[in-house]
């Protein structure tokens, strides 16, 4: 939970926010990320490091390229909550639907 | 049920079997939503009086509260009875209705017999909670901020036990 809070705090920087939003659409290499931004490639790498440390972004190596993608832990709290919420809601729905059949 | 998500955030998926027809199951899920919608999840200023899902494409999905106010949850995106329903969940990470925020909840009703229906639910686009939550930065440390919301989530989660 504390991790999620830290993660969202890391998104306070506008450039990091843009990087995060672009990675939420699809995984990308540093070079590709930098080509669409008004900052240098080393600066993008630095932002990615902050995002990684916050648990928002994960890296994997494909050959010689480092490809970045969103790390699921960043929104894990909301996801876990909704998972439990829908379990409870569907149980209640099933009870109501089964009752319907008996009428 | 849908395309593979492009991000690392997996949708929430649930499935339940009900002993009634798809038609009736669809009706209970939609027009009968007040019969089963969890009471303790009202996001408004007072307790939930009635949950409403308007039975048409573009219909409102909202709650009538005991103090007379209404509280939106989202809207109907696809109305295709009795097999498929797509709802827009527009409650953001600040736990407030936001017309500019949308995640999708797809529900399908598949007959498995005359009185047996499989109901599958997928809540997707959850990565949008992360993108949207950046706006929380300023309120993270304030009372009622993100930290408090997470605590509330944890409390609810802990009290629910194993419902799946």
Image (cartoon, coloured by chain):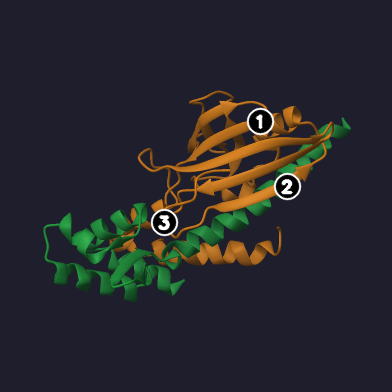
Chain colours: A green, B orange
In the rendered image, residue A59, in percent from the top left (x then y), is placed at: 35, 71
Q: Residues within 10 Å of mark 2 (few under 14, many from 20)?
A: some
Label 2, label 3: how many angstroms apart (C-alpha)? 26 Å
Q: Quadrant of residue A41?
A: bottom left
- Give the chain of mark 2: B
User: Residue lying farthest right?
Assistant: A102
- Give the chain of mark 3: B
In the rendered image, residue B53, in percent from the top left (x then y), is placed at: 58, 31
Q: Quadrant of residue A27?
A: bottom left
Depth check, front residue: A46 or A66: A66
Label 1, label 3: how many angstroms apart (C-alpha)? 28 Å
- Give the mark toward the camera: 2 or 3: 3
Q: Quadrant of the C terminus of chain A?
A: top right
Q: Secondary structure at mark 3?
A: loop
For image coordinates 28% across by 70% down, the residue present is A65
In primary-sequence order, the first of circles 2 and 3 is 3
In the rendered image, residue A80, in percent from the top left (x then y), is placed at: 55, 61
Q: Is residue B24 above or below residue B103?
A: above
- Give the mark toward the camera: 2 or 1: 1
| Marks 2 and 1 belong to one chain | yes
For disc 1, the marked residue is: B83
Res. B141 in view: no
Disc 1 to disc 3: CB gap under 8 Å? no
Left or right: B124 in relation to B22: left
For disc 3, the marked residue is: B7
**Residue B16 badge:** 2
């Amino acid at each position: 939970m504390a991790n999620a809070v830290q993660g969202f705090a890391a998104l306070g920087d506008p450039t990091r926010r843009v990087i995060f939003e672009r990675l939420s659409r699809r995984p990308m290499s540093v070079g590709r990320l930098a080509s669409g931004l008004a900052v240098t490639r080393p600066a993008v790498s630095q932002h990615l490091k902050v995002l990684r440390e916050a648990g928002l972004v994960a890296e994997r190596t494909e050959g010689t390229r480092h490809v970045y993608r969103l790390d699921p832990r960043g929104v894990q709290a909301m996801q876990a909550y909704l998972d439990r919420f829908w379990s409870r809601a569907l149980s209640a729905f099933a009870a109501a639907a089964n009752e319907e059949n008996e009428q | 049920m849908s395309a593979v998500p492009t991000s690392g955030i997996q949708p929430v998926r649930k499935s339940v079997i009900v002993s009634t027809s798809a038609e009736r199951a669809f009706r209970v899920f939609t027009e009968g939503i007040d019969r089963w919608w969890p009471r303790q999840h009202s996001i408004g200023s007072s307790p939930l009086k009635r949950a409403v899902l308007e039975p048409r494409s573009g219909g409102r999905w909202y709650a009538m509260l005991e103090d007379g106010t209404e509280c939106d949850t989202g809207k109907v995106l696809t109305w295709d009875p009795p097999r498929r329903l797509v709802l827009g969940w527009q409650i953001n990470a600040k736990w407030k209705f936001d017309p500019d925020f949308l995640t999708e909840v797809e529900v399908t009703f598949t007959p498995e017999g005359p009185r047996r229906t499989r109901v599958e639910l997928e809540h997707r686009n959850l990565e949008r909670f992360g993108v949207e939550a950046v706006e929380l930065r300023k309120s993270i440390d304030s009372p009622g901020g993100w930290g408090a919301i997470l605590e509330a989530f944890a409390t609810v989660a802990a009290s629910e036990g194993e419902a799946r």
